[in-house]
Image (cartoon, rainbow, N blue to C red):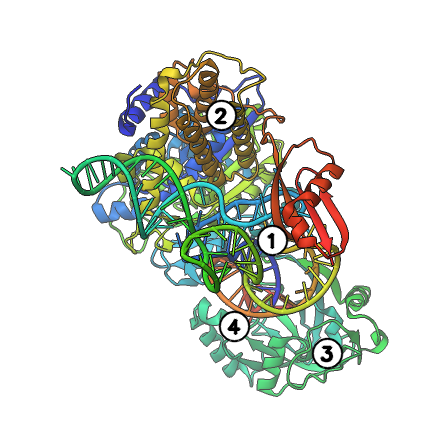
Amino acid sequence: MKDAYFPQEIEKKWQKIWEEKGAFKTPDTSDKPKYYALSMFPYPSGKLHMGHVRNYTITDVIARFKKMNGYNVLHPMGWDSFGLPAENAAMKHGANPENWTDENIAYMTKQLKMLGLSYDWDREVTTCKPDYYKWTQWLFLQLYKKGLAYKKEAAVNWCEECGTVLANEQVIDGKCWRCDHIVEKKYLSQWFLKITDYAEVLLEDLDKLTGWGDNVKTMQANWIGKSEGAILKFKVVENDLEVPVYTTRPDTVHGITYLVVAPEYKDIEKLTTSENKEAVEAYRANARKMTEIERLSTDRVKTGVPLGTHCINPFTGEKFPLWTADYALVEYGTGAVMAVPAHDTRDFDFAKKYNLPVKVVIQNPEKPSDCKTEAYTEPGVLINSNEFDGMDNEKAKKAITQKAVDGGFGEFKTQYRLRDWLVSRQRYWGAPIPVVYCDKCGIQPVPEEQLPVLLPKDVDFSVVGKSPITTSKTFLNTTCPCCGGPAKRETDTMDTFVCSSWYYLRYSDAKNDKMPFAKDKVNKWLPVDQYVGGIEHAILHLLYSRFFTKALRDMGLLDFDEPFKNLLTQGMVLKDGSKMSKSKGNTVDPDEIFENYGADTARLFILSDSPPARDFDWSDAGVEGCYKFLNRVWRLISSNAEYISASPFTLHSSLKKDNDDMVRLVHIAIKGITNDISNDFQFNTVISKYRELVNAIYDWRGKKSELDDEDKAVLSFAILTLIKLMSPVAVHLTEEAWHDLGGEGSIHDVEWPKWDENLAKASSITLVVQINGKVKDKIEADEALSEDELKALALNSEKVKELTAGKTIVKTIVVPKKLVNIVVK
RNA sequence: GCCCUGGUGGCGGAAUCGGUAGACGCGUCGGACUUAAAAUCCGGUUGGAGUUAAAUCCAGUGCCAGUUCAAGUCUGGCCCAGGGCACCA
């Protein structure tokens, strides 16, 4: 074994051998239980960044640990390779998105291999390849047949910078998720997936996801935004129309003093009197001009104009005016709101501004409020509400809605904030939506046997203001599958999030050319046992994937209802306190780390300083420290190589004291490391335990000038166990050491070490002696001592005698094997 | 405004059930080796008091109360930071 550690040499050597041997191929059939470890697949942007390194290292260590513990592990990788950056790069460099993407994939694949990741590359999926997107299209057609994909004209989010529409989930604070450009509303005919059909079950099943963090689950729950209330209908005085409103506060219905409809409300013109027409039109025109951000700003002063018409409150017979105001949103509920200024802060502000009456109908009997200065929104008891007076307001919600139901002017209603998922994009680099338009037959799905609908190659990427795909001369015109007449192809492509909503299923059967995946295989491997990725997908990808899984289950394509059993959302990689980014210039190139220190150092460091879920601050000194540690490990092994035997050996039951202590430390390390990995993947403490064990072996070894047979056996046991324990992290170093010491096969095929519970503790205990709860003494004691003996031992301590002299011992608490607390007065 | 997560030395962070607060590392200070440096090895490093040196004592896990023999850990009430949602009726 070489004296010095040359990571670059070792790493290249073993990567080549593993690849040639197919070391990480996963058989579909095995006696072992399955384990599916998955990282969120990357967008092939060009080069790996440290966030990727962190993500993939975490999953790789999990996969290797599970494999050593007897599982048949599926650990695949692929590419989320459709999307706008490829198209932008093509426009900028005159290249073509496909070549740009292929080159990036090739480079990043090389980097992933340099990191020593244990992927089964035979299962690689690339979403922009026809053998994959054929099935994305096929799944779209199945959704279409089920009525879950539909086209409709709607107010949609438009990003001028990206030249395409966006899903609600892709609008962050009124801006485009990708380019930060302000998002506008446009009326366009677009394709949607009916995720709202699954709103309730997507919400309910969050409870099943015990392996997910509460942060992600609440984010999803908030996004789905369930609320329970009622639809109440109000007759218009001036004509025979009715205005329905959605409310969660039917208990306040007797306090209505006006009613608001959104400026875009469908019947608004019919609800406007001729005298008010001009003012209303002006108000609506102004609302149209405002951006979403302006309109949704909560600190803006509320404005509105009266329509001139009135409604009747069926509960009181009172007549109240109709207004339009932009604080009512057309897309939520019915687009109309009953206003109760006394019990809603927004209505209150509005009523104060326009001098509308405030009528109190809920009161806290202990502290009645007259609602002169602010709305009372707390629970209470009804007043001024006829037969409901004195009723608790929660009870009244039901009772009043029931009265509306009985009277035919209302109903119970559950409302969700979640909207249908807009999936069409006016871009080239995506999976074409497989439909054609025929003048005679209308929208026609492309027959399944004609899939895939291939992306055309004859396109001009330099066009502005329209999708490059529309410049193709070969793509647009086709024949109608129904009548055989001339027809036009859909030129929109699918949101990349459609492609990524099912890729984890494809890994189970990546080469299937008859189906997206075989049912038995997908049922065998799924759900994913451990999914690892960034928190930024808490809503987008994770919600869409859950929806896809449920929809596919309802189509009978698979038999489980949640795709990801356990989810680990890893923190960001920071440098100097902020997220690594090109614009800030605080990035670290993984290639440089591989070159200067090797992949094992990179892997060790990225796991070492913070628990996986927390943000990780990159420091050059930290990398250096990890590199030094691996050198220290290497020296420990190489300088003792001549005494180490990889052949099986037995440790006698009665060892010399120092050898017994050493063996115990090894067992303690096995137990601690195993538990730390099993319990939430606390790799940072795993690594501190590697260091403790290495330090302990050095100490033990440093006290011996010559080694007898027993010493050699203990040394072999300690070193070989260390190598096994470190093998999931320092994958190359441990393989080289294992090989040099004469170990059989690959270190990555050996069994994970087991500990003996009797040995995984020190030979004696340290008895902590407290007086009134404060530590006063520590005594080495035999573990076998009884409670009484421990008590006697503590009371005999010189310190205790001194400190209790002249005082009364009130009582003594003994915690077996640990502690004695003496309470004195 | 509502929801989630977190708050421990100079820094990253440890601390199964309530039972030795600060593991391990970074940084730093001192020492060994060396002509010198690097590398390596050894030791100190929460604050304060104390001592020639020690021993030793006191305080201490965001703040204020509480439960307990015992609280970083449990309960109640706050404060701060990060993230999510938000004129959603």
Q: Earlier in the sequence, mark 3 or mark 2?
A: 3
The correct choice, above or below, for A716 with respect to B16 in the image is: above
Q: Which element is circle 2 on?
A: helix
Q: Nearer the viewer, residue A486 or A187?
A: A187
- Is residue A670 depicted above or below A251 in this figure? above
Residue A31 x, y percent position in the rendering: 58, 16
C-alpha distance separating marks 4 and 3: 24 Å
Kindly check if marks 3 and 2 are in contact, taking CB atoms under 8 A apart as contact. no
Residue indicated by mark 4: A298
Residue A623 is left or right of residue A350, and the answer is: left
Mark 3: secondary structure: helix
Amino acid at the residue labelled 4: Thr
Amino acid type of the residue that numbered disc 3 sits on in the rendered structure: Gly
Query: What residue would you read off at disc 2?
Result: A509
Instruction: Where is residue A491? Give x, y as percent.
Output: 38, 45
What separation in Å lies between label 2 and label 1 (alpha carbons)? 32 Å
Amino acid, disc 1: Ala
Query: In the image, is residue A384 above or below residue B57?
Result: below
For marks 2 and 4 on the same chain, the one whose residue lies earlier in the sequence? 4
